[in-house]
Amino acid sequence: MQSPTEAIDELWKAGKFRPPGRTTKQIEIELQRLYSITPTNTAVFLSKRPYLTRKKNLWLHKYPYSKQGGAALKENKFTQIFDSLKLHSEVVKVSRKLFIDGHYAQAILEAFKRLNNYVKAKAKINDDGKSLMLKAFSRNSPVLKLNALSNQTDFDEQEGYMHIFAGTMLGIRNPKAHDNIVQKDPYKTLEFLSLASLLFKKVDESKI
């Protein structure tokens, strides 16, 4: 038995959302007649379909289904998720298209390669990877200070992020650069990209 979402997708493929559109009630009748589905929150299911828009009380497609449209459904879903995260502009610049195209490992690699160069440019240190991060965010003599370094808590934060930055170079960037890593999970990829985004923002907040 199909889920309400799958049934709505089928209605879209069948052209049921062509202008002038359908009311929620009309869609419910179609779902019941064709798929024996009686959802209690049809409007919620409809609102989550990326190919639909609502004008007054009518649901219309933004674009008709086609083979390209079917691909666009998947693309739009992950485009919306990616964009909703409000990732740092550098992550968006180097990873967005790779992510949307399904090149997940490469999207992660490019984000952390860019992070390495971003730190290098701000700190003006001619080094790379783990060594660069240990120097840039050193606990006792940092080039990039993440806080005022006025008490134990400040020093602990500085040291903690130093290890996080260095760890991403060792544990994420280097394996993806040197090994044939396969990454098929878009949601895990977004977690990696979110981490990169957070670290970019910490670099922006740092003081020299």
Image: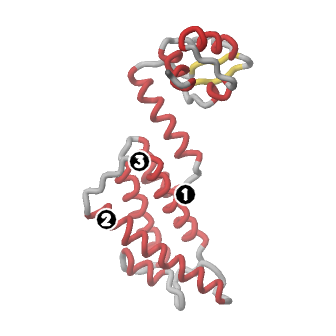
Q: Residues within 10 Å of mark 3 (few under 14, many from 20)?
A: few
Q: Amino acid at mark 3?
A: Asp
On the image, which quarter does residue 153 sit in?
bottom right
Of residues 83 and 153, the one nearer the viewer is 153
Residue, disc 3: 185
Residue at the image position 43 percent from the left and 59 percent from the top: 111
Residue 195, percent from left and from top: 51, 62
Of residues 29 and 160, the one nearer the viewer is 29
Q: Disc 1, disc 3: CB below 8 Å? A: no
Q: Quadrant of the C terminus?
A: bottom right
Mark in the foreground, 1 or 3? 3
Residue, disc 2: 175
Rounded to the nearest angstrom, the CA distance separating label 3 from label 2 is: 17 Å
How many labels sit on residues? 3
Q: Is residue 103 left or right of residue 23?
A: left
Rounded to the nearest angstrom, the CA distance separating label 1 from label 2 is: 23 Å
Which secondary structure lies at badge 1? loop
On the image, which quarter does residue 80 sit in?
top right
